[in-house]
Image (cartoon, rainbow, N blue to C red):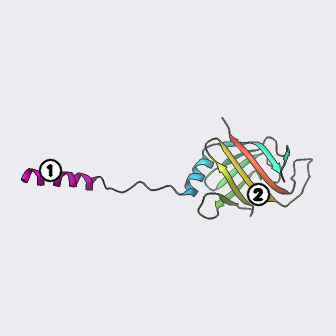
Amino acid sequence: MRFIYTLLATFGMMQISGCGKDEPKLTPNKVTEDLLNAQVWEMTEVKIDGLVSDLYAGLTLRFGSKTYTTTNGGKVWPATGTWEFVGDKGDKILRGDGLAITIENVDVSKLVMLFIWSSTTFDGGREGSLSGLHRMTFKRRN
């Protein structure tokens, strides 16, 4: 009988010792941030009010810890800036210049963002911007 009690006590101790601290759960914001920061994003398509545009051809975007840098972003994506999450679902960010962006999709190979751009500028040719709902699709640069 003593053997059974010893066995049960040993088994119970093994169960308790396995109950250490759980790994911290990743929040939706942390998951999105890790995906954004993991690579350079190259734009593959932009639609403005549903119409495909080549206005931002060659746009690349790189996120850092609450910062971003771009190339060929025109007025819509300044060369550098800051950003932060809005809420805790990992699907909305606010740039430092006040532009609210919805992240429609992000994974290891694709990023899709939506935002309303209200300025219409054409200084420097078509390097400016068009107003309207922008849906930008990016792929991960290899």
Residue nearest the observer in this picture, 24 or 72: 24
In the figure, 58 relative to 66: above or below? above
In the figure, 55 relative to 103: above or below? above
Q: Position of residue 41 (x, y in %)?
A: 69, 43
Residue assigned mark 2: 115
Q: Position of residue 52 (x, y in %)?
A: 84, 45
Q: Which residues are magenta?
A: 1-21
Considering the numbered disc 2 on the image, is that residue within a helix, a strand or a loop? strand
Amino acid marked by disc 2? Phe
Q: Position of residue 43 (x, y in %)?
A: 75, 43
Residue nearest the observer in this picture, 47 or 75: 47
Which residue is pictured at 60% across the width and 48% down the height? Answer: 35
Q: Residues within 10 Å of mark 1 (few under 14, many from 20)?
A: few
Which residue is pictured at 57% across the width and 49% down the height? Answer: 34
Q: CA distance from mark 1 to mark 2?
A: 63 Å
Which image quarter holds the C terminus?
Answer: top right
Residue assigned mark 1: 7
* Of marks 1 and 2, the one in the foreground: 1
Horizontal side of 53 relative to 11 (left or right) equals right
Which residue is pictured at 72% across the width and 58% down the height? Answer: 101
Q: Earlier in the sequence, mark 1 or mark 2?
A: 1
